[in-house]
Image: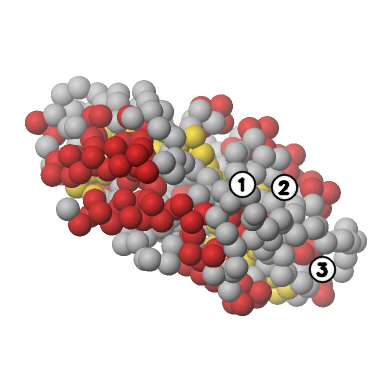
Amino acid sequence: MSRIRYTRRLPVVVVATGLALAVAACGGESSTDSAKPAPSAAAQLDAKADLSKQSLTVTVWPGYTPKELAEKAKAELKVSKVDIVEHDTNETAMAKLTTQAGESIDVAFVSGQYAQALNEQGLLEPIHPELIPNLSNLYPEATQLSYDKGNKFSVPYTWGTTGICYRSDLVKAEPKSWNDILKPPAWADKKVTMLATERWLALPALKVLKFSVNTTKDEEIAKAKELLLAAKPHVIYDDVTFGQKLQSGEAVMSEAWDGWCPTTDAKKNIKFVVPSEGSDLWVDTMVIMKSSKNKEAAHALINYILNPEIHSWAAANINYKVPNKAAMDKVEVPEGSLLGISPAELLNGEAAIDLGEASVKYTRLSTEVAAK
């Protein structure tokens, strides 16, 4: 099973113009503001439209779809052209989609809370389910995502959770709590890694304190900061190579996204656990831009991707679960793989939602922790 590395979340070095400011640049307000603009009404679409007169431009993370997707989709859908452009992070995608440059994009892959932010600014076309019959392939749980219940403006592509990835042969006691990361025992000092990406940096501390991962309360974020500062001398921040560190023994425990925990390593000594305090549920989605002039073709592309033979590629090649039962039924799950985590287990996690302008509180938190 190949493992393609890419960054789908905010970069470790936080740029001042984050999600909230990117959205604000469109004239929008905080997603928590009651005065926020309403999403635009759905366009009238033609189920019998001649797709040969339409073309598609898709923005997606590198290596997140099959290399031959454009060629095969063009032939299958009979559209005139399919272009794939890439973005390395959600932030890069937002900078594109919330400016005039976004008018050239038909379909975008972004994480759930970013889809929510785009929709709140009226930038997304509502999903027309009659044009995507393969929505029936999704797990029922995939229609109950907190940022978009009923898949009204987005279609989930991959999903997963965050937990502790660890060397079962090197730990003296198997980790069960986020405190095992935040307050590592002496034998694990400087052999523990944490994620530095802002919302995931905060996650272990917020969960230990029994706060929401979406809290915007200053006093709760301040308490999380205290725990993170206390942990900092004893941990290493690593968002990309923690799997290699575990394999080499440089690390014995890591805060990790499930798909990047190398539990299928030949030595079978790497395990994954969701701590007792709970964790998150992350989702990457497909959305259609309101400005698209090719909306019928865009719906047809999403329907094509939801074919089990196409959608199963993501699970087989990037080791992330897909919320498509028909696709997952086609995937051979290797021994020790985390692909077997059930949808019900995933939904035990708390989904991160867009916090609008309040998201800068997490930018400030990560900056202050990094500076100490």
Q: Mark 2: which amino acid?
A: Lys
Which one is in front, 68 or 116?
Answer: 116
Q: Mark 1: which amino acid?
A: Pro
**Residue to which mark 3 is pinned:** 51
Identified at 61% across, 77% down, the residue is 100
Identified at 46% across, 52% down, the residue is 358
Residue 2: image location, x then y, percent: 42, 51
Q: Earlier in the sequence, mark 3 or mark 1?
A: 3
Res 140 → quadrant: top right
Which one is in front, 310 or 285?
Answer: 285
Which element carries disc 1, helix, strand or loop?
Answer: strand
Residue 332: image location, x then y, percent: 52, 36
Instruction: Indicate whether 309 appears above or below 175.
Output: below
Residue 59: image location, x then y, percent: 57, 66
Which element carries disc 3, helix, strand or loop?
Answer: helix
- Marker disc for residue 17: none
Instruction: Indicate whether 101 appears above or below 236.
Output: below
- Give the number of the mark in front: 3 or 1: 1
**Residue to which mark 2 is pinned:** 152
- Give the number of the mark in front: 2 or 3: 2
What is the CA distance from the residue labelled 3 to the residue labelled 1? Answer: 24 Å
**Residue to which mark 1 is pinned:** 156
Does the residue at mark 2 contact the one at mark 1 (Cβ under 8 Å)? no
**Is any atom of residue 131 visible in this view?**
yes
Q: Mark 3: which amino acid?
A: Leu
Identified at 71% across, 70% down, the residue is 291
Identified at 17% across, 32% down, the residue is 184
Crowding around mark 3 (Cα neighbors within 10 Å: few <14, some 14 to 19, many 20+) is: some
Res 302 → quadrant: bottom right
What is the CA distance from the residue labelled 2 to the residue labelled 1? Answer: 11 Å
